[in-house]
Image: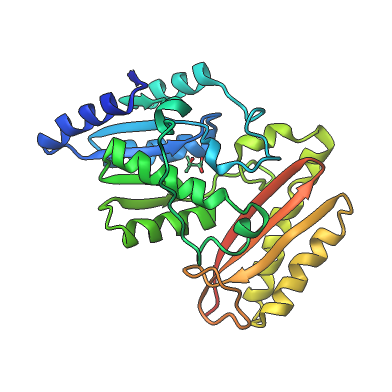
Amino acid sequence: MKIIRSPSAMTAWSEGLRREGVRIGLVPTMGALHDGHRALIRAARLRCDALAVSIFVNPTQFGPREDLTKYPRHISRDRALCRKEGVDVCFEPTAEAMYPERFQTIVTLPTIARRWEGEVRPHHFSGVATVVTKLFGIVRPQISYFGQKDFQQSALVRQLVEDLNLGVTIVVGSTVREKDGLALSSRNVYLSPDDRVRAVTLYRSLQAGADVIRRGVRAGKVIQTAMHRVVKAEPSMAVDYLVVCNPHTLEPLSMVTGKAVLLGAVRLGPVRLIDNLLVTAF
Ligand code: PAF
């Protein structure tokens, strides 16, 4: 497995392969890889001839009071996982190489980024959209893989690719969960043992929403009340949002009539957890 740090060397590697008709896959990550990333890498490995994983803790998607400096970094463990899964290149650029002094372009998607995570983390999605656009420009993949756990992010990336004609197929892999249902996340390591036990309440509240839909409830407000009821029973958990939305526009639904996504974000002590479930009302 090659480790490439310079963006121009990364592009040279890809361009050489593209000229030979090789299908290149990219799994963009911020490192601290877990089984959720592993599942994306495995799916990509099956479908792509050459596979790059980018490991870059992108500073522009962190707010001033967020965990950029504390974000978990385990580069040797990440490289070992990539090697084991047959990754061809780990692309590990520095922040200086990605954002040199003269850098000034910001990519924003004002509508899809407005609500939910966008409301709580105002510049987060312009940071994500900008770095993903750069990674696609540098790595030039034909296919790229994102996790469903970051539902709004994957919707935003699909929109970005469509709007800017980037020619990258986006594949969204299902959320990988712990045995009790907690969605895997690099930030779960911040949970205290007690909060780790409580953390599954978010998933349970989404399941409660899905259950009432299965039982025939269609009114958005009633579905949201069912989700809130579960979280209220866990007083140490504070809700940022628990909503039922259109899965394409991410606008809240007053009535569920087909596909919908239940989106949730809560705070447990210093940790913020997000999760979602896709549901269909027949
Ligand atoms: O989901 C992530 O890990 C990041 O937001 C991404 C897509 C790698 C961009 O930095």
Nearest to the observer: residue 258 or residue 134: 134
Q: Residue at x 55, y 44 (%)?
A: 176
Quick check: 202 left or right of 35?
right
User: In the picture shown, does residue 29 fall above or below 274?
Assistant: above
* Way the structure is coloured: rainbow
Estimate the x, y position of residue 253 in percent, counting from the top left: 60, 78
- Horizontally, residue 55 falls left or right of residue 257, namely left
**Is 249 or 276 nearer to us in this picture?**
249
Residue visible at 87% across and 58% down in the picture: 233
Quadrant of residue 21 within the rendered picture: top left
Q: How many marks?
A: 0
* Residue 158 position in % (x across, y down): 39, 58
Residue 160, image x, y percentages: 38, 57
Residue 144 visible in the snapshot: yes
Seen from this angle, which residue lies furthest front? 102
Q: Name the side, left or right, on which 86 lies relative to 113.
A: left
Q: Which residue: 85% across, 61% down? A: 232
| Residue drawn where x is 43% and y is 52% of the image | 107
Which quadrant of the rendered structure holds the N terminus? top left
Task: Give the residue furthest to the top.
Answer: 76
Q: Quadrant of residue 80?
A: top left
Residue 149 shows in this picture: no
* Residue most extreme to the left: 20
Q: Nearer the viewer, residue 31 or 223?
A: 31
